[in-house]
Amino acid sequence: MENAAGDFTEKLNEWGKAKTPFFFLVDYQFRKPLAWKLSDIDSNEILFNLNGFTNDAPGFSDDLPEHIRFDKHPLAFKDYQSKFDCVLHHLNAGNSFLVNLSVPTPVETNLTLKQIFRHSEAPYRLLFKNRFVCFSPEIFVRIRGNRIASFPMKGTIDASVPNAEQVILSDYKEAAEHATIVDLIRNDMSMVAEKVWVERYRYIDRIQASDKTLLQVSSEIAGTLPTGFDGQYGDLLKKLLPAGSITGAPKPRTLEIIQEAEQYNRGYYTGVMGYFDGENFESAVMIRFIEQQDQQLVFKSGGGITALSNAKSEFQEVIDKVYLPFSHAPHAVL
């Protein structure tokens, strides 16, 4: 495992220094990181579209069936409650301030993973070997010149709730959770950047789901890379991962709590995908994630838990995040 991470890090450092374009994937635990030179990627195995940077053929589309079926089968609330209680115990004991708790939800659909990839309206999309599809709204880090920026998302609400934007922005628990993550990302960023500042604090992103619109609260934290950085993207990722927005704070102890509470393998879910085009580096957190497990499709989703959290509303948020990001599916049965 250590060799895989070491080889990956060296490869990205070498390609970054030489300005060789590449694409990469890092799993949540940094055990199976993968990287390819752009010229070596087989589009029959890997399709990506990262904010318009893509290897997918223009105009290529897989038609959707007239009636779309997407059924979710969440775990029972009592099973979620036991995981939640485990997290809450640690929060009340002062072992963490914020824990991102995720669960797998079996889903059934008449769509292929490729159809989901092609029709998802999300800025960061990936289809990996027909094993999983990801349609993420969340940037991890973006580097332009010597400026690095991260855009953590923390706080979600259904846009149909009356005064939804005001409700989410004035919610004390959500505000505290968001402040914790911004502080964590600032600390993480200071490991790789010389100067770090908050460019934008708690602004609203609109995320389109097939049956509703979600409002998501984001912030932008920026920094300046040191003069001697020289394209060392492997070292940079090793220092910053796993992403603070999908773990919690303080990070080392919170990672142990997540393992104890979740009791399942996240795999590439909540890892990071990204590219370097020879000049610009961009990456995204792999949330909104459907994985093929044997004959079963599983949608992995989660949310941040604090000592102020309510189990039922957190459970509902996890279920709300199980969706297809299609803005129009006129005959959809969801």
Image (cartoon, helix red, strand yellow):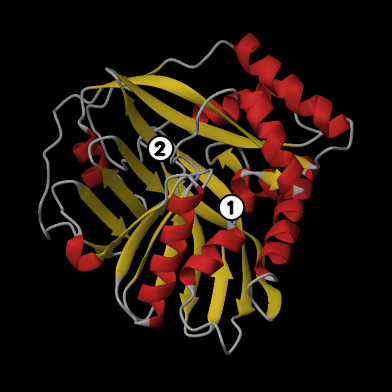
Question: How far is mark 1 from mark 2, CA to CA?
Answer: 16 Å
Residue sitting at the far front: 3
Residue, x 56% and y 71% (percent of image)?
149
The reply, left or right, for residue 57 in relation to residue 157 is left
Q: How far across and how far down the image is residue 127, in percent? A: 27, 44
Give the structural element (helix, strand or loop) at label 2: strand
Q: Which residue is mark 2?
A: 289
Mark 1 residue type: Ala
Residue 243, numbered circle: 1
- Image quarter (top left, top right, bottom left or bottom right) of the C terminus: top left
- To which quarter of the image does residue 128 belong? top left
Neighbor class of circle 1 (other Cα within 10 Å; few <14, some 14-19, many 20+) is many
- To which quarter of the image does residue 228 belong? bottom right
Residue 170 shows in the view: no
Residue, x 46% and y 52% (percent of image)?
3
Residue, x 51% and y 59% (percent of image)?
140
Q: How far across and how far down the image is residue 106, in percent? A: 40, 19
Q: How far across and how far down the image is residue 229, in percent? A: 54, 82
Mark 2 residue type: Phe
Residue, x 54% and y 43% (percent of image)?
29
Q: How far across and how far down the image is residue 317, in percent? A: 58, 31
Residue 84, numbered circle: none
- To which quarter of the image does residue 274 belong? bottom left
Neighbor class of circle 2 (other Cα within 10 Å; few <14, some 14-19, many 20+) is many
Along the line of sight, the residue nearer the viewer: 193 or 15: 15
Of the image marks 1 and 2, the number of the one nearer the N terminus: 1
User: Where 215 falls versus 308 (above or below)?
Assistant: below
Give the structural element (helix, strand or loop) at label 1: loop
